[in-house]
Image (spheres, grey):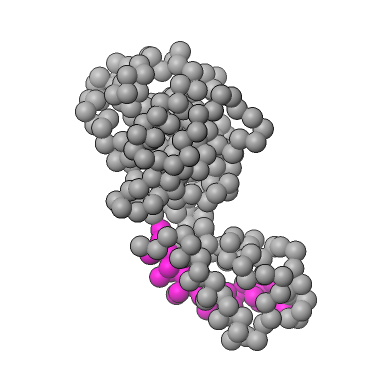
Amino acid sequence: MLNKTQAKARILSQVLDLLNRHHWQDTDDFSLRVVDKVAPAISDGYMPYSVVFSATKTKTRFFVRNRLSRRVFCSAFVKELSPYLKEIGVATTAGSLSFSELFPEIRSVGHLKAEAFLSKLEPLEERKIQDALRSALREKGATNMVQRKSDSSLEVCDLEDFVLKIGGRDTSFTSVVKGYKSVKHPKIGLGDISHQIMKAFNGTFPDYVLLVLAKPPVDGVITSLVRYGESIGNRHLVILADPIDLARFLSYYKVI
């Protein structure tokens, strides 16, 4: 499988070939900037025109220098590069990964036992959940497991970019944690988490965003998260840990 650096190098090569075939002059590092924005959205199926169009919205003289419209460039990009980008996407797109695959040890805690622990999630501070995740991930060799005393305006997500080897491959993650007290209503809606999911992804374009919930999501949230993942080229982007999985995790690590 290709890592992100290798994938970007291959995509850049194809973009430069496209410019050369059309005799378009690369100015202001236009090709590099487009590739930086397009690469995270490469999927194993297609490259959305909207993604390419958005990626070209950058301050540049490229279109003026080449007497070219953005629409013509984007159409050529999608039409001519899609077959190559599909091959690259197949080689780089992360597959599905569940919370119990990330923490297989929690399988030793049965479903009924986990249900009995659900009430213990209510008084638990969100910080304790975050710290428990950091400790468990540090034991697994994850990078960047820095303890955080408190949140700040600079925070991108609850657990910022970290890398963990999955199946021998360096796999990148960020994480969003919602404690029981973080949301007043009985269930977590899309509006409670959507901005954090997008911020967590746009910060470093990880392979996965780990979403840990101490309350169940309302109907439709999972579908919306899958659709968001598909829109950026990875339908498996969000790994959900629901209250049952969270209770299993915290029980195994003796937090509750």
- The image shows a total of numbered marks equal to 0
Left or right: residue 136 versus residue 30 is: left
Residue at 54% x, 28% y is 148
Q: 26 or 47: nearer the eye?
A: 26
Q: Quadrant of the C terminus?
A: top left
Image: 166 above or below 155: below
Image: 192 above or below 84: above
Q: 47 or 13: nearer the eye?
A: 13
Residue 139 falls in image quadrant: top left
Residue at 25% x, 19% y is 113
Residue at 72% x, 70% y is 28
Q: x%, y% of residue 219?
A: 44, 34
Q: x%, y% of residue 73?
A: 64, 75
Q: 181 or 130: nearer the eye?
A: 130
Left or right: residue 67 versus residue 96 is: right
Task: Please indicate, yes or no, whether residue 215 appears anywhere in the rendered image.
Answer: no
Q: Main secondary structure of the magenta part?
A: helix
Magenta residues span: 68-93
Task: Reply yes or no: does residue 183 show up in magenta.
Answer: no
Task: Please indicate, yes or no, whether residue 172 appears anywhere in the rendered image.
Answer: yes
Q: x%, y% of residue 203?
A: 58, 46
Q: Quadrant of the N terminus?
A: bottom left
Task: Reply yes or no: does residue 78 show up in magenta.
Answer: yes
Residue at 43% x, 64% y is 89
Residue 49 falls in image quadrant: bottom right
